[in-house]
Image: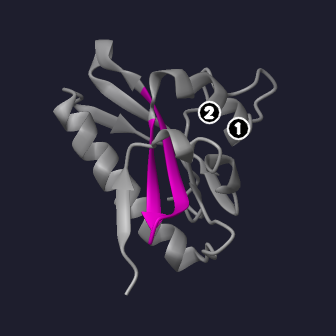
């Protein structure tokens, strides 16, 4: 039986995070700083580049295989966290709709717990109603 674990990334995870891209959804608000001026969202790698310094992400592993990532932006002044993106999949874990949802739910549950511990009162995410991320 597979074991799903959600945690903060370790140093050895940083190189493997870029492999988690089989399925990704962008959850940042349209006015978020991670959206280009022409309205198109930037890639996960670009978003990670600006967010990695502050360690604003969680990873999901299945039997020590990194297969899910949630990227968020902390806004402690306004007591809120903004979700930027969710990604799922790896070379050994196929990110079907069902698998992606299970990974993302686990990641979001832990992100909400951490937001509460950090004093956040709100967690924001934006998606289209027909999107699997919704």
Report the side of 6 relative to 94 (left or right).
left
**On the picture, is 68 further left or further right than 43?**
left
Q: Residue furthest bottom?
A: 1
- Residue 86, given in percent of the width and then of the height, sits at 54, 51
53 versus 84 height, above or below: above
Q: Nearer the viewer, residue 10 or 21?
A: 10
Q: Residue at x 44, y 72 (%)?
A: 63
**Vertical placement of 97 versus 77: above or below?**
below
Name the foreground residue: 50 vs 76.
50
Residue 106 quadrant: bottom left
Q: Is residue 125 magenta?
A: no
Quadrant of residue 55 in the image? Answer: top left
> Which class describes the residues within 10 Å of circle 1: few (<14), some (14-19), or many (20+)?
few
Q: The N terminus lies in which quarter of the figure? A: bottom left
* Residue 85 in sight: no
- Mark 2 touches mark 1? (CB < 8 Å): yes
Q: Residue furthest front?
A: 12
Q: Nearer the viewer, residue 58 or 29?
A: 58
The crowd level at tag 2 (other Cα within 10 Å; few <14, some 14-19, many 20+) is: some
Residue 87 — which label?
none
- In percent of width and height, residue 99 lies at 51, 75
Q: Closest to the observer: 8 or 69? A: 8
Element type where label 2 sits in the image: helix
Residue 103, position in %: x, y? 45, 65
Q: CA distance from mark 2 to mark 1?
A: 5 Å
Q: Residue at x 61, y 48 (%)?
A: 17
Can residue 61 be spotted in the picture? Answer: yes
Q: Which residues are magenta?
A: 57-73
Q: Is residue 124 above or below residue 102?
A: above
Q: Which residue is the site of mark 1?
A: 45
Residue 48, label in figure: 2
Q: Measuring 33% from the left and 45% from the top, which residue is drawn there? A: 111
């Amino acid at each position: 039986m597979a074991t799903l674990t959600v945690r903060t990334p370790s140093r050895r995870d940083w190189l493997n995070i870029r492999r988690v891209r089989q399925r990704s959804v962008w959850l940042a608000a349209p006015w978020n700083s991670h959206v280009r001026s022409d309205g198109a969202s930037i890639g996960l790698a670009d978003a990670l580049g600006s967010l990695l310094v502050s360690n604003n992400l969680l990873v999901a592993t299945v039997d020590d295989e990194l297969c899910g990532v949630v990227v968020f932006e902390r806004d402690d002044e306004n007591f809120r966290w903004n979700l930027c993106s969710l990604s799922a999949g790896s070379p050994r874990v196929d990110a079907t709709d069902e698998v992606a949802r299970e990974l993302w739910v686990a990641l979001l549950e832990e992100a909400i717990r951490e937001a509460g511990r950090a004093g956040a009162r709100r967690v924001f995410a934006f998606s289209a109603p027909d999107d699997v991320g919704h």
